[in-house]
Structures are given as C-alpha cells and as structure tokens.
Image: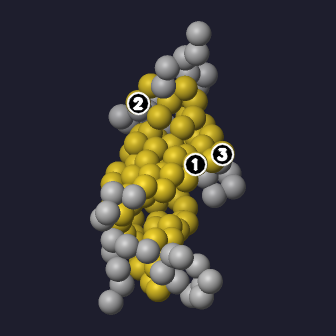
Amino acid sequence: MGQSLKKVDDVKVIIEHLEFERSKSLSSYYLYVCFYYISIINLSPQTIILKGRKWIVTNDLGEKVVIEGMGIVGSYPKLRLGEKFRYSSHHFFSRPSVAEGAYFGINSENMPIVVPIPKFSLLIPP
C-alpha cells in the first residue's frame, strides 16, 4: 500500500512579489501574465527535497487550469534546516483568477511530504 503525504508546517512558502502585464503573444488565448517571485524556507530539522509542484488556477467564472510536473523551474531543491530556495516563474491568464497549489517531495526519512503554496490573486493590469 502507498505512503500517504505528510503536510509539512515548518517549511514556509513566501510570495515575495507579483508583477502583472499584458501578454505579448498575439496568438494566445491568454491575455495577461503574472510573474511571481517565491521563497521556500526550511524551518524543519529534517532535510527536504522538493520533487514537483501542482498549481490550480481558477478564474472568476470557476473555470480551472491545473499545471503540474516534476521539479521546480528545472531543479529539485534540497533544503537543510534554515536554507532557502528562491525562484521566479509565471502564469498566463485571461480573466481575474486565483492561483494556489503545493510542492511535493520527501524528507530525510524518505517520507513523502506536501508543502502548501499560499493563494494569491491574478489581477488584470491597468
């Protein structure tokens, strides 16, 4: 039987900065882009390795887009106590939306973990 995921409360995910722009792609359904800057800080005594992520972007009509995959911007961060991983990426969107999700990985006991990502709004730029 598979192992269940353990939610880790002592790994902090901080949304440091958000930027919103109109998309430069003329062929895309997505009119806007949100650039986000995130820090992940391990306050746990256990070393963790983040192996993947899942985002759910829900627009104001209730329509959902799920984005998931291995790694975080091409890497698999290994964080010991007090270490931080900082990265930036983006979401495309067409209507006011909310992004939320989680990172998945393992701790130093090889137990599966999940680290929630705080919800944030994707706003239409002026």
Q: Is residue 47 above or below residue 2?
A: below
Front position among marks 3 and 1: 1
Q: Crowdedness of circle 3 by 10 Å Cα count: few (<14), some, many (20+)?
A: some
Rendered image: mark on residue 7? 2
Q: Could you say where residue 35 lies in the image, as x and y percent from the top left? A: 48, 72
Residue at the image position 63 percent from the left and 58 percent from the top: 73
For discs 2 and 1, the disc positioned in front in the rendered view:
1
Considering the numbered disc 1 on the image, is that residue within a helix, a strand or a loop? Answer: strand
Task: Name above or below for residue 27 compared with residue 101.
Answer: below
Across and down, in percent, residue 27 comes to: 62, 83
- Specify which label sits upstream in the sequence, 3 or 2: 2
> Dot 1: few (<14), some (14–19), or many (≥20) neighbours within 10 Å?
some
Q: Nearer the viewer, residue 51 or 54?
A: 54
| Circle 2 residues within 10 Å: few <14, some 14–19, many ≥20 | some
**What is the CA distance from the residue labelled 2 to the residue labelled 1?**
18 Å
Tell me the quadrant of the picture where the C terminus can be found.
bottom left
Nearest the camera: 121 or 6?
A: 121
Instruction: Write down the residue under mark 3.
Output: 70
Among the 4 quarters of the image, the one containing residue 62: bottom left
The amino acid type of the residue labelled 1 equals Glu
User: Marks 1 and 3: in contact by CB < 8 Å?
Assistant: no
Q: Are marks 2 and 1 in contact (CB under 8 Å)?
A: no
Image quadrant in which you'd find residue 106: top right
- Please, is residue 10 above or below residue 5 in the view? below
Amino acid type of disc 3?
Met
Residue 48 point in image, percent of width and height: 56, 34
Q: Which residue is mark 1?
A: 68
Q: Are marks 3 and 2 in contact (CB under 8 Å)?
A: no
Residue 94 location in percent, x, y?
43, 74
Q: Amino acid at mark 2?
A: Lys
Going by the image, does 120 lie left or right of 82? left
Closest to the observer, 53 or 93: 93
